[in-house]
Image (cartoon, helix red, strand yellow):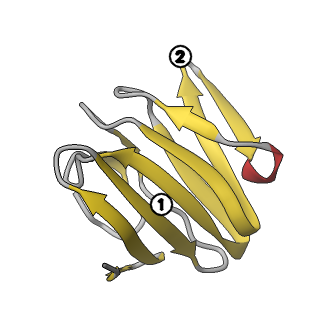
């Protein structure tokens, strides 16, 4: 089972989906692109870098913490504001709970709500 979902920043490639349990996907992010500033109400996700250089931004109160994904895996709990950016592009592996439509966008450079 493989499903490609085109996005304005690149594409998602879902490689595993067990309903009501988990989802595994690759996020292929094109150079100079970013995902929306967002949080999830129920979804928990863990990200790790496959290739390239991608930065995970986490909002903690008034601070923004930036993690280079080449330095490890990061788990994002529900309610945590986050987004990813890249200059040269890259691929992230994301494994999450099965909440595919659980995204609250706070800011999106592509005009999505």
Q: Which mark is residue 35?
A: 1
Q: Nearer the viewer, residue 2 or 76?
A: 2
Q: Quick one: SS at disc 2?
A: loop
Q: Which mark is residue 52?
A: none
Mark 2 crowd level (few <14, some 14–19, many ≥20, 10 Å Cα): few
Image position, residue 99 (x, y; %): 23, 46
Which quadrant is the C terminus positioned in?
bottom left
Could you give the CA–CA distance between mark 2 and mark 1, rounded to whole angstroms? 20 Å
Residue 108 visible at all:
no
The image quadrant that residue 54 belongs to is bottom right
Q: Quick one: SS at disc 1?
A: loop
Q: Nearer the viewer, mark 2 or mark 1?
A: 1
Which residue is pictured at 54% across the width and 34% down the height?
A: 75
The image quadrant that residue 64 belongs to is top right
Which residue is pictured at 25% across the width and 32% down the height?
A: 42
Q: Residue furthest right?
A: 71
Which residue is pictured at 37% across the width and 71% down the height?
A: 14
Which quadrant is the N terminus positioned in?
bottom left
Q: Nearer the viewer, residue 92 or 98?
A: 98
Q: Is residue 85 above or below residue 60?
A: below
CB under 8 Å between discs 2 and 1: no
Which residue is pictured at 69% across the width and 52% down the height?
A: 55
Mark 1 crowd level (few <14, some 14–19, many ≥20, 10 Å Cα): many
Image position, residue 60 (x, y; %): 56, 21
**What residue did someone put label 2 on?**
61
Left or right, 62 with respect to 107, comes to right
Residue 70 visible at all:
yes
């Amino acid at each position: 089972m493989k499903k490609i979902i085109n996005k304005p920043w690149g594409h998602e490639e879902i490689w595993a989906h067990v309903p009501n349990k988990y989802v595994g996907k690759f996020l292929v992010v094109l150079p100079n692109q970013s995902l929306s500033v967002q949080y999830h109400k129920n979804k928990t996700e863990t990200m790790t870098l496959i290739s390239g250089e991608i930065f995970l931004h986490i909002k903690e109160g008034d601070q923004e913490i930036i993690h280079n994904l080449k330095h490890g895996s990061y788990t994002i709990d529900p309610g945590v504001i986050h987004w990813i950016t890249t200059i040269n592009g890259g691929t992230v592996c994301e494994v999450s709970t099965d909440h595919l439509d659980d995204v609250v966008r706070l800011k999106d450079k592509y005009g999505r709500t």
